[in-house]
Image: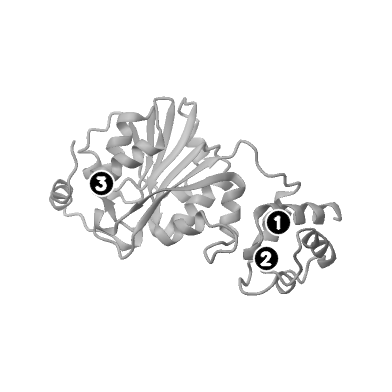
Amino acid sequence: MEYSPKKIKEQLNQTNFNFKKKFGQNFIVDKNVIHSIISKSAIDKDTLVIEIGPGAGSLTTELDKVAGHVLAYEIDVTLKPILEKQNLTNTTIIYEDFLKRNIEKDLKKYNYKKAYVVANLPYYITTPIIIKLIEDKLNIDKIVVMVQKEVGNRFKAKPNTKEYNSLSIFLNYYYTVEKLLDVSKNVFIPKPNVDSIVVSFVKKETKIKVDNEQIFFKLVKDSFKQKRKTLKNNLKDYNLEIIEEVLKKHNLDLNVRAEALPIEIFAEIANNLNKKM
């Protein structure tokens, strides 16, 4: 089926569909953007694609054509009549909350060489979805998601920028993060209040050396606890002598803020703290 705003609206009207703010429903209706996402995702028949929030199915129908299989999760069961009208021959849709599913168990039913996530994520749960994908250790090779522009900028943020935070480091530990394209708010129905961005996360074959991930992630989180405060203030409960020793090697001191430190320095501090435990 060829998609257009008119045809999607007709289908939604025929089923008396009501957009639900609680699910962050903004459906993409621009074919050029959809085709660009598909092209930049580099999907082939060896790829199983996980889609979160297929909505009316505009992206799903294109994924269905190129992937080995599409496994989609839709929380809103009232979309079922609309999705069933699409010519989806290669897609399984599970009508449940993605955040509550055992995704690893679901994936065991399929044979595939690569697993990608490709989705237009609901703005209100973007970060919990990304964190679940990582913490569930699903071995996802690539994530290509459309998110709120401000959130996407945090995902790919570099040190010494206002967007840089603990999540930037968390993601950078596992993935190479890159912006693929900007997306105007005018290509959605209903139109959201903000523009979007498509971001890719490609799994790193070699991660930075971290001896104890628990210590590393706690250190990063605590360092950004109050972003405008220095490490000296945020890390009062840590061995500041060890931290200061590492910082001096990089011509820094305890009065530096977390936003100035690249992931490599956090890893070095964490490894040295781990040695003394």
- Tell me if label 2 and label 1 are in contact, CB under 8 Å: yes
User: Badge 1, how many Cα within 10 Å: few under 14, some, many 20+?
Assistant: many
Quarter of the image where one finds residue 161:
bottom right
Quadrant (top left, top right, bottom left, bottom right) of the N terminus: top left
Q: Tag 1, which secondary structure?
A: helix
Nearer mark to the viewer, of 2 and 3: 2
Q: Which residue is mark 1?
A: 266
- Tell me if label 2 and label 3 are in contact, CB under 8 Å: no
Vertical side of 98 occupied by 110: above or below? above
Q: Which residue is mark 2?
A: 223
Cα distance, mark 2 to mark 3?
Answer: 42 Å
Nearer mark to the viewer, of 2 and 1: 1
Does residue 171 appear left or right of residue 245 in this picture? Answer: left
Q: Nearer the viewer, residue 222 or 56?
A: 222
Residue 205 percent location from the top left of the image: 61, 36
Vertical side of 55 occupied by 269: above or below? below
Amino acid at circle 3: Ala
Residue 256 percent location from the top left of the image: 70, 69
Sequence-earlier tag: 2 or 1: 2
Sequence-earlier tag: 2 or 3: 3
Give me the residue at 25% from left, 41% from top.
Answer: 83
Q: Which residue is mark 3?
A: 56
Cα distance, mark 2 to mark 1?
Answer: 9 Å
Q: Tag 2, which secondary structure?
A: helix
- Tell me if label 1 and label 3 are in contact, CB under 8 Å: no
Nearer mark to the viewer, of 1 and 3: 1
Amino acid at circle 2: Ser
Q: Nearer the viewer, residue 177 or 277?
A: 177
Does residue 17 appear left or right of residue 126 in this picture? Answer: left
Any mark on residue 178, and which? none
